[in-house]
Image: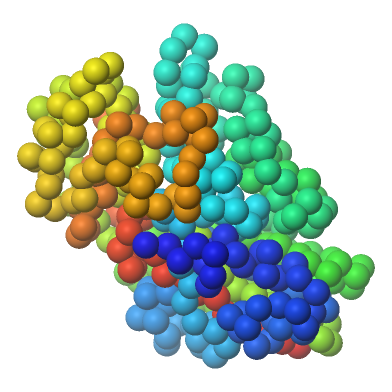
Amino acid sequence: MPSYGASSLDSLVPALLQAPGERPVWLPGPLGGAPQVVLLALDGLGWRQLQDRCRWAPVLVGLEGGPISSVAPTTTAAALTSLTTGMVPAAHGIVGYKFAVAGPSGPEVLNVLRWTTRSGDARPFVPPRQAQPLAAFGGRPVPVVSRSDFSGSGFSQAHQQGAREVAWTVASSLPPLVGDLLAQGEAFVYAYYEGIDKVAHAAGLGALYDAELAFVDRLVGDVMSVLPPGAALAVTSDHGQVDVGSRARPLAPPVAASTVLVSGEARFRWLHSRPGEAQDLLERAQAHYGGEAWVASRAEVVARGLFGGPLRDEFLGRLGDVAMVPLGHDAYLDPADGGDARLVCRHGGLTADEMFVPLLAAGA
């Protein structure tokens, strides 16, 4: 379970935005009194994956800090929105990688990172700033240093409201851009890099992952080199990974037959039933998957506090009727997403490999 409210992603930015000397004691020491802070989010770097590969990341493992928890589901859309807004998923409403929305001609499933449905670009009928109405970074115009491909996207609009985009096209530009912002007097800079997640999805936790981690370790060192005296760097992530490989498979036919929409992600799958058939779908899913997954109704998932509290009706409607969360390294594919089957590593579930992320820090 996420540790919402303390030592978790949703509490990190509010803690860092407090005045120097007034920040909570759970933050690593270099962050307590720093007048300028850079927060670098490394997508997909789990705490356990980092601990298993210390030899490839001497800079990172030499920093002060330890693990904190992500959110549920452990996926980029929900976790980054909690990070930037300082709120739990129940409050901001980005409850997964894919969730149900009202489309032009009926219910559809929104891919949050692409902000698309089967109808195409969803911004005309799912305005990002209405789907996620909370300001980022406490309403401050914080500079966000990230890849130019993300500038102005639907997801960027949703989870970075009020921030100022500072785009780069190659990763080598990230450290000098951060340095320029600090030299201009910015008290808080947020930077984001997604390479580790991409490599893990495409190639697993092997040699290519290790090579990317070694590159990221050098990138962290380059960011540290541009810190002015007294400034501090905080490094975190949105989620970890598990290697699923061949354990990703389609839904069993009896379960698929009772499902009209599939949302969520392969390791936190939501099934949407036909009207009046939610209980039947729950029983079928429990019969087929109860031995390898937590299979629960929407009401049970919400009652367990996975999203950090009760959800508004609008956000409840984004969830399916039945959740399936694998206990091991299984994954359940979306029949409408042909690319889903090609992923090697995945996340979204509630294992320690996915839930724990680093919070590390260094001062100049």
> Looking at the picture, does residue 98 appear above or below residue 62?
above
Side of 104 where 172 appears, left or right:
right
Viewport quadrant of the N terminus: bottom left
Side of 287 where 154 appears, left or right:
right
Viewer can see residue 208: no
Q: Residue at x 30, y 49 (%)?
A: 267
As drawn, the residue found furthest toward the right would be: 184
Q: Residue at x 64, y 27 (%)?
A: 127
Q: Please state the horizontal and vertical placement of residue 58, each as a whole percent of the image.
A: 51, 88
Q: Residue at x 70, y 71 (%)?
A: 16
As drawn, the residue found furthest toward the top would be: 105
> Looking at the picture, does residue 334 appear above or below residue 169?
above
Query: Of residues 288 and 230, which is closer to you in this image?
Result: 288
Viewer can see residue 49: yes
Viewport quadrant of the C terminus: bottom right
Q: Please state the horizontal and vertical placement of residue 35, each as a whole percent of the image.
A: 83, 78
Number of numbered labels in the structure image? 0
Q: Please state the horizontal and vertical placement of residue 97, each as a whole percent of the image.
A: 45, 42
Q: Please state the horizontal and vertical placement of residue 6, each as a whole percent of the image.
A: 54, 70
Q: Residue at x 33, y 39 (%)?
A: 299
Coloring scheme of the render? rainbow
Q: Where on the picture, by quarter, is residue 82?
A: bottom right
Query: Of residues 90 and 213, which is closer to you in this image?
Result: 90
Side of 226 where 126 appears, left or right:
left
Q: Where on the picture, by quarter, is residue 333?
A: top left
Q: Where on the picture, by quarter, is residue 21?
A: bottom right
